[in-house]
């Protein structure tokens, strides 16, 4: 079971890196698009990061479900799962923003993207709190 935990933690780390980095990269991609008027290297990097982390997200969720089953689904795991679902929705929304940016559509302001980025940080802190404290 230790290997499942290790794989879970590694994949969560990679997924969280993308959750934090891609909204910020969208800000810089938006600026690059305004400067160049076309798809540049930052856009390619952002798309690759998002795609790579999608696989990590799937593995993180599957190993997390395995661990929840192995632990017997205590109450705190249900809360963690709900928070992870919220982060997955955030991640899917980010993917929508990436797809729109690929077409040159940047409707969101820098401020919106910064706040959007910080929401994911709060979500990740909440998940960590639940895992460490195990409130119920």
Image (cartoon, rainbow, N blue to C red):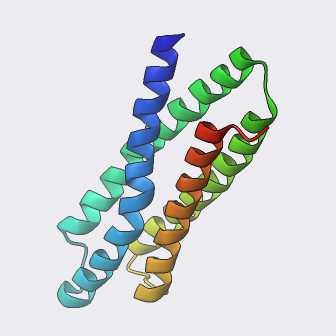
The residue shown at (40%, 31%) is 10
Which of 70/76 is in front? 76
Q: In the displayed image of the protein, which residue is found farthest to the top? A: 1
Quarter holding residue 56: top left
Q: In the visual, does 87 lie left or right of 53?
A: right
**Image position of 27 with respect to 130: above or below:** below
Residue 40 appears anywhere in the view:
yes
**Which quadrant of the view contains residue 96?**
bottom right
Q: Residue at x 44, y 66 (%)?
A: 98
Residue at 45 percent across and 87 percent down: it is 111
Please provide percent x and percent y for residue 16.
44, 49
Image coordinates of residue 128 in percent, x first then y, are: 56, 45
Residue 78 horizontal side relative to residue 131, left or right: right
Q: Is residue 131 left or right of residue 101?
A: right
Q: Is residue 80 above or below residue 46?
A: above
Q: Is residue 102 visible?
A: no
Quarter of the image with the N terminus is top right
Count of numbered labels shown in the rendering: 0
Which quarter of the rendered picture does the C terminus lie within?
top right
């Amino acid at each position: 079971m230790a290997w499942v935990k290790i794989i879970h933690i590694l994949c969560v780390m990679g997924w969280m890196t993308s959750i934090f980095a891609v909204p910020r990269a969208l800000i810089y991609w938006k600026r690059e698009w305004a400067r160049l008027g076309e798809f540049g290297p930052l856009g390619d990097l952002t798309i690759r990061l998002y795609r790579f982390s999608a696989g990590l997200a799937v593995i993180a969720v599957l190993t997390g479900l395995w661990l929840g089953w192995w632990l017997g689904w205590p109450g705190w795991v249900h809360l963690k799962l709900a928070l992870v679902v919220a982060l997955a929705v955030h991640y899917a929304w980010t993917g929508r923003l990436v797809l729109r940016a690929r077409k040159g559509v940047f409707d969101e302001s820098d401020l919106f993207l910064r706040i959007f980025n910080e929401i994911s940080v709060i979500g990740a802190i909440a998940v960590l709190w639940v895992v460490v404290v195990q409130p119920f």
